């Protein structure tokens, strides 16, 4: 019990240190994501609670040091707050929103883009790599964990490099590699390992997801995708749902709707044109499914977004 208290106190102290660093680097820059001189690293800051914002999220590590957040994956809700982190291991259509933040105590998050190839290099370098099994049961492509002292220490050291930009080209890759190692050694190490283990079910599903996100406008044939994954159609459907929480058809539908929203918001496309451009043949079906996903008609949703921004 005494050791647990010491560990808890050490993590709390490190969180406060990272909070101070993120506050300094985001203060006066407004809400949103703030890029840094380290390409893979961004900081998030929000001074108020936010509405759910659906987006296609690529693989990341996110650590919260102040405030709380919720993420929706299909019908599942994930809650996480101070001293917790989220790992998203494959491209997933998510809705994320801040649920605890004020102007005086804004939500603050550390966000690091993940590269499965770097994870693969570390796995290959491990002496016990041959003992890794190709598990039949795929892990969910998203999980939440409590941060440990070694991981948050890496985050602090990486953030501190921003004060010595001349050190970034040499030291940042080393620290990022250590972060990957800490994830592999952490509580959800087996799930992280599956991301980059060649031949694992998650790795095969991840490769198919890349194909789907690159060409989601064309009609989808599950049998073709299953062949790409070297699985039977039933096995592919099972593992795809295990990783993403949704069927391949539901996944493609979300990709199409997210792209349609982007076209209308950023390209001033009208709803009918956007529907056809993302692969819908029926504008009425598009409108129904869009309203179901975003909680408003295409016209109403875009009008609301423009007012909010």
Image (spheres, rainbow, N blue to C red):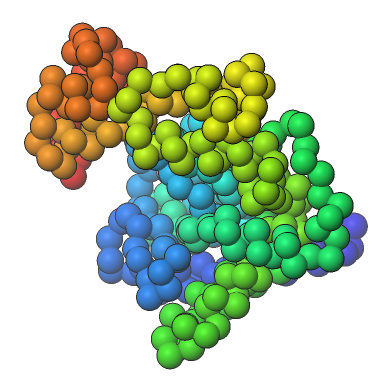
Answer with left or right where residue 251 lies relative to residue 304.
right
Residue 45: horizontal and vertical position, in percent? Answer: 38, 57
Whether residue 236 is visible: yes
* Looking at the image, residue 298 lies above or below residue 29: above
The correct choice, above or below, for 252 with respect to 14 in the image is above
> How many tags in the picture?
0
Residue at x 19% of width, y 22% of height: 276
Relative to 80, 130 lies left or right: right
Q: Residue at x 53, y 41 (%)?
A: 207
Instruction: Determine the image quadrant of residue 185.
Output: bottom right
282 or 60: nearer the eye? 282
The image quadrant that residue 26 belongs to is bottom left
**In what quadrant of the picture does the N terminus appear?**
bottom right
In this view, the residue farthest toward the right is: 1
Where, by quadrant of the figure, is residue 307 drawn?
Answer: top left
| 252, above or below 93, in the image | above
Q: Position of residue 184 (x, y in %)?
A: 72, 57
In the image, 272 versus 306, the foreground residue is: 272
Q: Is residue 289 left or right of residue 270?
A: right
Placement of 76 over or under 179, stated as above or below: above
Q: Is residue 105 visible?
A: no
Q: Which of the image's four quarters has the C terminus?
A: top left
**Rendered location of residue 248, percent (x, y):** 49, 23
- State the image coordinates of residue 296 (x, y, percent, origin top left): 25, 20
């Amino acid at each position: 019990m005494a050791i647990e208290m010491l560990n808890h106190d050490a993590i709390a102290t490190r969180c406060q240190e990272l909070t101070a660093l993120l506050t300094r680097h985001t203060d006066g820059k407004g809400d949103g994501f703030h890029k840094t001189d380290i390409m893979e690293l961004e900081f998030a800051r929000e001074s108020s609670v936010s509405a759910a914002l659906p987006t296609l999220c690529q693989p990341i590590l996110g650590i919260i040091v102040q405030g709380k957040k919720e993420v929706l994956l299909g019908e599942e809700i994930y809650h996480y707050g101070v001293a917790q982190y989220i790992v998203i291991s494959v491209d997933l259509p998510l809705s994320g929103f801040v649920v605890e933040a004020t102007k005086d105590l804004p939500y603050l998050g550390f966000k690091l883009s993940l590269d499965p190839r770097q994870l693969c290099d570390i796995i290959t370098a491990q002496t016990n790599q041959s003992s890794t099994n190709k598990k039949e049961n795929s892990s969910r492509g998203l999980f939440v964990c409590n941060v440990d002292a070694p991981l948050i220490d890496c985050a602090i050291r990486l953030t501190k490099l921003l004060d010595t930009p001349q050190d970034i080209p040499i030291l940042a890759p080393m620290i990022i590699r250590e972060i990957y190692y800490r994830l592999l050694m952490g509580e959800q190490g087996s799930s992280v390992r599956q991301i980059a283990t060649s031949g694992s079910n998650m790795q095969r599903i991840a490769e198919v997801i890349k194909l789907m996100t690159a060409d989601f406008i064309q009609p989808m044939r599950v049998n073709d995708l299953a062949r790409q994954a070297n699985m039977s159609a039933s096995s592919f459907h099972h593992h795809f749902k295990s990783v993403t929480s949704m069927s391949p058809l539901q996944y493609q539908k979300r990709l199409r709707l997210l792209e349609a929203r982007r076209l209308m918001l950023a390209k001033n496309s009208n709803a009918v044109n956007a529907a056809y451009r993302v692969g819908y043949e029926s504008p009425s079906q598009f409108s129904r499914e869009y309203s179901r996903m975003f909680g408003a008609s295409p016209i109403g949703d875009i009008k609301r977004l423009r007012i909010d921004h």
